[in-house]
Every structure is written in C-alpha cells, then in structure tokens.
Amino acid sequence: MSKILGIGNAVLDIILTVDHHPQEDEELRAQNKDVETGGNINNTLYVLNQLGHQTEICTTVAADNESKQLIAGLNQRNISTEHTQKFIKGRTPTSFVTLNAQNGHRTIVHYRDLPELSFDFFAKIEIEEYDWLHFEGRNTTQLPGMINIAKTFLTHQPISLEVEKSRDGIEALFSSVNLLIFSHHYAKAKGFNNGQELLESLTLDNVNMVCTWGTKGVWYKAINQNIEHIEAEQVSPVIDTLGAGDTFNAALIHSLIGQKSLKDSVIFASKLAAKKCLQPGLDNIIAEQETKKPLANIKQLSNAKTLVTTSENGDSLVLIKYEDSVRCYINNCPHQDVPLNEAYKIDVNPFEKTMKCSVHDAFFNIEDGLCIDGPCWDESLKSVAIKIDDNGDIYTI
Ligand code: FRU
C-alpha cells in the first residue's frame, strides 16, 4: 500500500439520468438523480483507495452548505481531507451532469467560482511523507511553484500530471514530472489527430507519457522507448462513462507503483476503465468476478445465428454478435413473456440486423433489442451487461 496525495479540484456532481440528451427548450423527466462527490482527482483517489492505497486530497473547499456534503462524501470515500484550503468567498464547485441512458455518454455544465489552491497552502504540506504525488493540470498560475518544490524536495517519489485540457503555460511543466497523462481533448486542442502525433511532437527524455483516446485506444511512450499503441477494450452496453478517465489514471498509477512496465500498466488501466463504463458510478469497481464461469466464447458466436445459454443465476440468455462486438439479452419476449425460441429457433436476418421471436413474429433490432415490427412494437428486450476477456470468454458483469 502506498500513501498518495492528489492535488486538484473536488466538486459536487449532480447527475440526472435521462433517456436522451435534451434539446433546447425541451422539458424532460429524469429517470434518476444522484448527488456524488466528483472531480478528476477525487475520483482517481477513490479508485486508488479501492486498489488498496491510502489517499489524501489537497483541494479548496467553500463555506456553504454544499461543502459539508462534499467533505462528507470525500470522507465516505476514505479520502483524507486534512489538507483542504477553506474559502469564505465562493461556492462549492458543482457539475451538472446529464447521463444519456441510451449510450452512457455524459454532458457536463460546470459551475466554478471558488478560488483555486494557493502555492502557500501547498508549500506547508510535508510532501516527503507521501509515496506518490498526482497533480491535476489546472491552476497554471500556482501549479509551477508546487511542482517545482515537489521536484526539489522529493528524492524518489514519482510525480504525475494529468493534462486533460489545454491551459496557458502547462507545457512548461512537462519536463518536471515523471508521468504525463494526456487526454485526447488536450491533443485535439493542440491540433493533433491522434496520440502518436502528440507524443511525437514532445521531446522529453525522462518522462513516461500516455495519451488516452476513448474508443481509439491509448498511445504511450516509456522512457527511451518507441511510441506504442493499444486498442480500446470493447464493452457493451456502456452504462456510464463519467469518471472512466479518472479510473484509467488510478489504475495506471497503481500498476506503476507495483513496478509493472508502462505497457502492462496501460493495459491494466484500459481494462479497468472499460469495466467502469459498464457500471454506474465508481463504487465497488474492484469487486472480483473472475471466479465466474464464461457464458460462451466469442468464437462460438456469429452475426447470423443466436446462441441461447443459461446464466449462473438461471436466466435464459440470447447471445449474438453485432458487428465486431456482442449483444446479450434476457431470452424473454416482452409480448407474452415467453422465450424467443419457445416455438422454433430464433431466426436472424443478418442484412436487416434483426432477430425474430418464434412465437408471434416480433422483430427485434440486434443492436439495441428494440422491437421494430410485430405485436410488441417499441418495447425492448432486456439487455444484459457483459464483459469479454482476452481469451474471448464472455461473462455477465
Ligand atoms: C469526471 C469528473 C466529474 C466532474 C468533472 C470535472 O471525470 O471529474 O466528476 O464533474 O469530471 O471536470
């Protein structure tokens, strides 16, 4: 277990789950409302905590009512709040998130008027006590001083910097840290089309660099090595992408603390970030499910035929390939609550990308389980979250 200090913003996330992203002037009812503590550093520390580390945050907090909720949330996540700089002026940073239930995508409106952490506050912390310092790349008036004293006083403890957005002067910090984690937002803002181009443009000798690019995978460059790339993990259905990047950062740091290579660490981080997308929120993200038996192997599936199998809890499931990924549904037609293969096998039309209930000819989209023709038009098959491991074995989540 390592002791990790994260320096950045802690915010309140107000998350509304909606069945589509609202248009201007639209009125919409949310399916769910969650109030969580968020912010990249907070989320990363929470996952690091679940990975077995002792985690502390260095951040600013307001004096309003929401700040009590924020502190309680941090403590609930086992993140020490000893190093919080309090401000009377300004309100708790809040992010209003709409989470689209159809695809797990999140849209965020930020409210920020609280001052950022000051160099003087940070300078009083005994940073030598920590095994790793992880900075959020913001607050570029104060950050250079903080990173400078960290670099000066720390002997062996790594310093990592998350570069999510393009901010004035942030490039000057790149050579002072040990690990740079770039997001595609930063790379795109700088005019690069992929992580390869971004990493090629940087001539830094002693820094490990990683650039994440959502479904396009991850580029990385270990010290004195060439740039490499790994594909993104494929997961379905995507439930919630909020905090997936923060999960990636935590898993990367954890694996590097465990002396794994940058390559192995990037692979581990991609897997955990993908797993995060399959669940709401960040709770219990490390819960093991590896003892489960696979439902099937991807090699047994095709785009033209379903495979009906039974889950460990006794549910009958329909598995089918959709393009290069896999869809899994409860084998139950919403029309009369009967298995789709009750009367005969489930016919598949690979051109229309539909499958048909054998009882009353209801046609369902393979992609999303929606009935597009037949007696239960506009109703849907119930989708089951699955995960496919490196061997192609398919598991329920
Ligand atoms: C997720 C997140 C949210 C927060 C926002 C801040 O990565 O940290 O928790 O609202 O991003 O940018």
Image (cartoon, grey):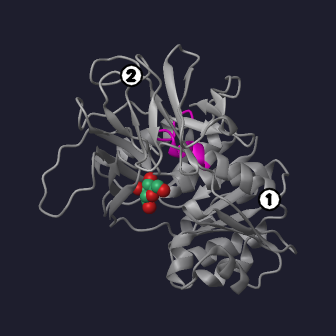
Q: Residue at x 46, y 37 (%)?
A: 348
Residue segment shown in magenta: 273-284
* x, y percent for residue 162: 60, 66
Q: Is residue 279 magenta?
A: yes
The quadrant of the image that shows the N terminus is: top right
Horizontal placement of 193 versus 392: left or right?
Answer: left
Neighbour tally class for label 2: few under 14, some 14-19, many 20 plus, Cα within 10 Å: many
Horizontal placement of 266 versus 187: left or right?
Answer: right
How far apart marks 2 and 1 lie (CA) works out to: 43 Å
Place residue 210 in its image quadrant: bottom right
Q: Which image quarter has ligand 1? A: bottom left
Horizontal placement of 253 versus 367: left or right?
Answer: right
Question: From the viewer's perspective, is residue 166 above or below residue 31?
Answer: below
Q: Amino acid at mark 1?
A: Lys
Q: Toward the viewer: 355 or 385?
A: 355
Label 2 or label 1, whichever lies nearer to me, is 2
Q: Secondary structure at mark 2?
A: loop
* x, y percent for residue 96: 31, 55
Q: Which residue is mark 2?
A: 332
Q: Amino acid at mark 2?
A: Asn
Question: From the viewer's perspective, is residue 180 above or below residue 273?
Answer: below
Q: Which residue is mark 1?
A: 263
Q: Is residue 45 visible?
A: no
